[in-house]
Amino acid sequence: MDSLLTLFSENLLPVFLAAGAGYALAFFSPLESRPVARIAFYIFSPCLVFTLLTENELGNGALLGMFAFATTQMLLAAALAWVLSKMFGFSRHITVAVVLAGLLPNAGNFGLSVSQFAFGDPGLAQASLFFIASGVMANTLGVYLASLGNSDYKTALLGLLKLPTIYAVILAVVFLRFGWTLPVPVARATNVLADAAIPTMLVLLGMLLHQTRWRGNLRGLAVANGVRLLASPAIALLLAVPFGLSGVARQAGVLEAAMPAAVMTTVLAAEFQVEPEFMTAVVFTSTLLSPLTLTPLLAYLGG
């Protein structure tokens, strides 16, 4: 029991304390969360993705391996969420919200922090690859699914062209392919903005948790939490073998897959008006419940 408490206090509690600052800000101040979310979504996140891609020293093999693992894991979790939603007869909007929760773990502000605390810089490097995959997924399939709540397929696909993170990924791939580097002033500005991404999203997480106001589909909430906190890490553990993940790569990959629902899901739900209150409730409950699943998982993984 003492070891579990130590794992929680050293690896998870710091994240909750940082998010608590955002919760306190929202409690004592009328500051709205949406402008903060848009800044994180349109400025900080693209800079972070570009920086992680261009400065990662793990090599193309590690990047592609983790990217394939993460993408497969997220798609399988989302597919499970969709099947369960259909079994329970959820509405279109609730189904989209549950699938988003299954698809997107909080691999950024929560996952990167915990991975670094638990597995050091090697864990952070591996976790950053998973985060890049989840960022790409959030800004492609995630946006597409969210927009389906109120749009047709063509409109949803065209909406992807408006996302800055997509262009950040493309730009990073071009820079890596040709060995280019940014001019020093631009590089330093990009790094400053990238460094702001995780703390901003942690504060945003706290602000969004404070704003949770929801009454409704308890079955949907249970399914979303079950897929995100229980089924998702189980899928990741099974996939680690065929994808050849071992050591710190396996530790970080499975841990990232086990994270609570991503803050980005609430941003997407609010942007496309797909049950934003329900989605925030999923993030709130999965975040509060996550120590119950993440702490023993850290013990199992050797954190």
Image (cartoon, rainbow, N blue to C red):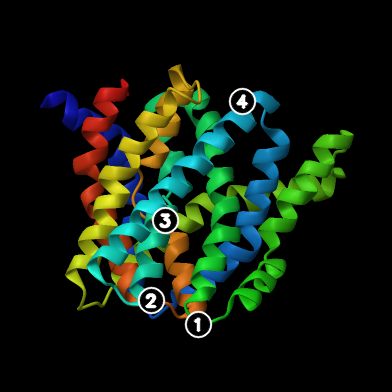
Check the image and report above or below for 37 versus 108: below
Q: Position of residue 126 (x, y in %)?
A: 53, 30
Q: Tag on residue 62?
A: 4
Q: Position of residue 201 (x, y in %)?
A: 47, 57
Q: Secondary structure at mark 2?
A: helix
Q: Position of residue 81 (x, y in %)?
A: 34, 57
Q: Nearer the viewer, mark 3 or mark 4?
A: 4
Q: Which residue is mark 3?
A: 262
Q: Residues within 10 Å of mark 2 (few under 14, many from 20)?
A: some
Give the Cα distance between marks 2 and 3: 20 Å
Q: Residue at x 47, y 77 (%)?
A: 149
Check the image and report above or below for 184 versus 135: above
Q: Which residue is mark 2?
A: 92
Give the Cα distance between marks 2 and 1: 10 Å
Q: Nearer the viewer, mark 1 or mark 3?
A: 1
Q: Secondary structure at mark 3?
A: loop
- Earlier in the chain: of badge 2 and badge 4, it is 4
Q: Which residue is mark 1?
A: 150
Give the Cα distance between marks 2 and 4: 38 Å
Give the Cα distance between marks 3 and 4: 24 Å
Kindly check if marks 1 and 4 are in contact, taking CB atoms under 8 A apart as contact.
no
Q: Residue at x 24, y 52 (%)?
A: 226
